[in-house]
Amino acid sequence: MKRMLAATALLLPLAAAQAQDSVYINAPVVLAEPIVEVVTRKIPHEYCRNEQVRVVNNGAHSATPGLLGAVVGGVVGGAAGSDSRYQPVIAGAGALLGASIGTDIAHRQSAQAYYVNERRCDTEYELRDIERVVGYRVGYEYQGNTFYTRTASAPGNTIRLRVDVSPEP
């Protein structure tokens, strides 16, 4: 009760000097702890490497090997079936077979494989925890008692308090 009377006696002159029912004082800060929040971030990193890639060059497609094979096949087939009444059929079959063989040989000879280096890139992510201060837990003394509050920024050696003064009912 004596403390309350002493505090009231100290504050009444301040209140009388103010036109309002509040006064502002500076209270000493006894504690200021940062409030830390941990945020996980995904940090992208590009990872590149050289790879050997096989390339097949089929060359230009020409009808000449197939046509030449058909002619040779037709001549050979016609000569082989010269004593038969089916000579035209045998010559035709020889021409078809010759065209197929000529085309296959041309493809095998023109197909060339070689290797080239190609740059291949991928994105990898590194998880990184980042701490950031989101506020401060502040302890201050007022009339012999310690009170706590939270502030957005770091206080100095004192914190400004608004003290409301009103008569006891």
Image (cartoon, helix red, strand yellow):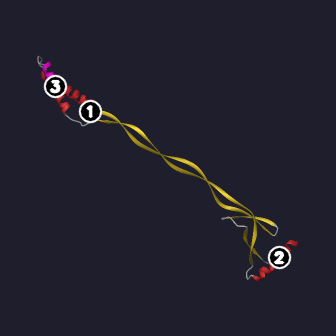
Q: Which amino acid does the dot numbered 2 rest on?
A: Thr
Q: Which amino acid does the dot numbered 1 rest on?
A: Ser
Q: Residue at x 42, y 41 (%)?
A: 50
Is label 1 in a helix, a strand or a loop? helix
State the separation of the CA atoms marked 2 and 1. Answer: 107 Å
Is 102 situated above or below 144? above
Is 51 situated above or below 106? below
Quarter of the view holding residue 107: top left
Classify mark 3: residues with Cα within 10 Å, few (<14), some (14-19) or many (20+).
Answer: some
Counting residues from the start of the chain, the first of labels 1 and 3 encountered is 3
For disc 3, the marked residue is: 72
Residue 75 among those drawn in magenta: yes
Q: Nearer the viewer, residue 66 or 157?
A: 157
Q: Quadrant of the N terminus?
A: bottom right
Q: Residue at x 84, y 78 (%)?
A: 9
x and y, in percent, of residue 85 in the image: 11, 19
Is there CB contact under 8 Å for labels 1 and 3?
no
Q: Nearer the viewer, residue 29 or 80?
A: 29
Counting residues from the start of the chain, the first of labels 3 and 2 encountered is 2
Position of 113 with respect to 36 (left or right) is left
For disc 1, the marked residue is: 110
Q: Which amino acid does the dot numbered 3 rest on?
A: Val
Q: How many marks?
A: 3
State the separation of the CA atoms marked 1 and 3. Answer: 21 Å
Which residue occupies the extreme top position in the image? 83
x and y, in percent, of residue 110 in the image: 26, 32
Is label 2 in a helix, a strand or a loop? helix
Per the rendering, the mark at residue 8 is 2
Query: Range of the magenta residues?
Result: 74-80
Position of 52 with respect to 143 (left or right) is left
Is 30 situated above or below 80? below
Position of 46 with respect to 103 (left or right) is right
